[in-house]
Amino acid sequence: MADAVYPATPAELAEALRHAASRKRSIALAGNASKHLMGGSAAAADAAIFTTALTRVLAYEPNDLTISVEAGLPWSELTRILAVNRQMVPLDPPFAARATVGGVIAANCSGPRRRLYGTARDLVIGMQFATLEGKLVQSGGMVVKNVAGLDMAKLMIGSFGTLAAIAAVNFKLTPAPEVERSFLLPFETLANAIAARNRILNGALQPAALDLLHPSAGASVGKPLWLLAIRAGGNAAAVDRCEHELAPLAAGVALEGAQHESLWTHIREFTPKFLAANPGGAVVRASCTLKEVEATVASFDGPVLARAGSGVCYGYFAEVAEAAAWLRKTGKRAAKAVIEFSPEASKHGLELWPSPGGDFEVMRQVKNLFDPANLLNRGRLYGRI
């Protein structure tokens, strides 16, 4: 069994990495391990390092719309702190109740509002990370600006802890909208839903989120039809105008207050709930162009939840073998597809990421630069790294 270490400061985190690496001990790195079913299965390790004791807010400047926090701070706590000043980091990661800031960034998690606000690469303006050499590296800062040259922090986003350990993250913040309202538009067919989506995308007012739910997913919110879930925000006049422009598309419903929040919590946590209900199941993530969303969604037989305004589609399979079969048959024709979540016991026999793309060799070289002995989170990046 691996020795577990819980560093309380970034310096202790760096020392823990150096101590293990200097003895050629393999390392399992995690926050709260809320996403242990995501990506590949980390190989058995000699040492385990958890960042959950790193929970400080290092700097918060509400007037400058910036905050710096340690990697082990729970995402739910970051959200609570910012809400006091009606500010937010609108990533909407799943597993939000247990996820840590570092885990969200290392897994590059995002949710419905990525369409308007972007992903972690758009919201992270700086980072401190610890290397296997025991060094603390600062990349970026607390000023929102364009970065010239190589931004080392960007390498850590989505690396699943295979390069270094995130110690602290600096975010640019977004003011919360004055008014928010959600709309659920039902459609009998996928084609009709996509036609409505196209009209929304071509409109003057752009919603923060535009998600498409397959009827079996729509049933979870009481509508067993194709559903467009739309999140609009701004001043009252803008939100009212949005409602007026959506009215001709379908006989939908408008949600505010607690119902509005409940809807987006449900959509954000759809994957965790599905996995809890289907222990042998899997989730496929397929990224495609907006024109390809209709065909990609149609290729799934079961529940589908698609970011219809950004081209990220999630297919849900009650059995992992079904996900593997879809990937063999259809996934290689999709722009990018991975088995994002799968049972731990099945990971070693699965090809989780069949087509890593032409830049994969660069990723290997980066891994060799940071971790030439391949000690850190071996296999976590979809079994490829």
Image (cartoon, rainbow, N blue to C red):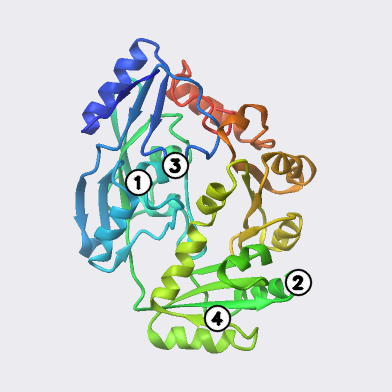
Callout in the foreground (4, 3): 3
The crowd level at tag 2 (other Cα within 10 Å; few <14, some 14-19, many 20+) is: some
Q: Are marks 1 and 3 in contact (CB under 8 Å)?
A: no
Picture residue at 21% right of the left edge, 48% below the top? 57
Residue linked to disc 2: 191
Quadrant of the frame with the C terminus: top right
Q: Tag 2, which secondary structure?
A: helix
Residue 252 falls in which quadrant of the image? bottom right
Quadrant of the frame with the N terminus: top left
Q: Reading the chain from its start, which is encountered first: label 1 or label 3?
A: 1
Picture residue at 32% right of the left edge, 45% below the top? 126
Q: Reading the chain from its start, which is encountered first: label 4 or label 3?
A: 3
Judge whether 243 appears above or below 322 on screen. below
Residue linked to disc 1: 101
Q: Reading the chain from its start, which is encountered first: label 2 or label 4?
A: 2
Compute the Cα span from label 1 to label 3: 11 Å
Left/right placement of residue 233 relative to residue 218 reads left
Residue 93 image offset from top left, x and y in percent = 44, 53
Amino acid carrying label 3: it is Ile
Q: Are marks 3 and 2 in contact (CB under 8 Å)?
A: no
Residue 71 falls in which quadrant of the image? top left
Amino acid carrying label 4: it is Ala
Residue 58 image offset from top left, x and y in percent = 20, 46
Picture residue at 58% right of the left edge, 34% below the top? 382
Q: Are marks 4 and 3 in contact (CB under 8 Å)?
A: no
Compute the Cα span from label 2 to label 4: 22 Å
Q: Reading the chain from its start, which is encountered first: label 1 or label 2?
A: 1
Residue linked to disc 4: 204
The crowd level at tag 4 (other Cα within 10 Å; few <14, some 14-19, many 20+) is: few
User: Relative to the observer, which residue lies in front, 143 or 256?
Assistant: 256
Q: Are marks 1 and 2 in contact (CB under 8 Å)?
A: no
Residue linked to disc 3: 157
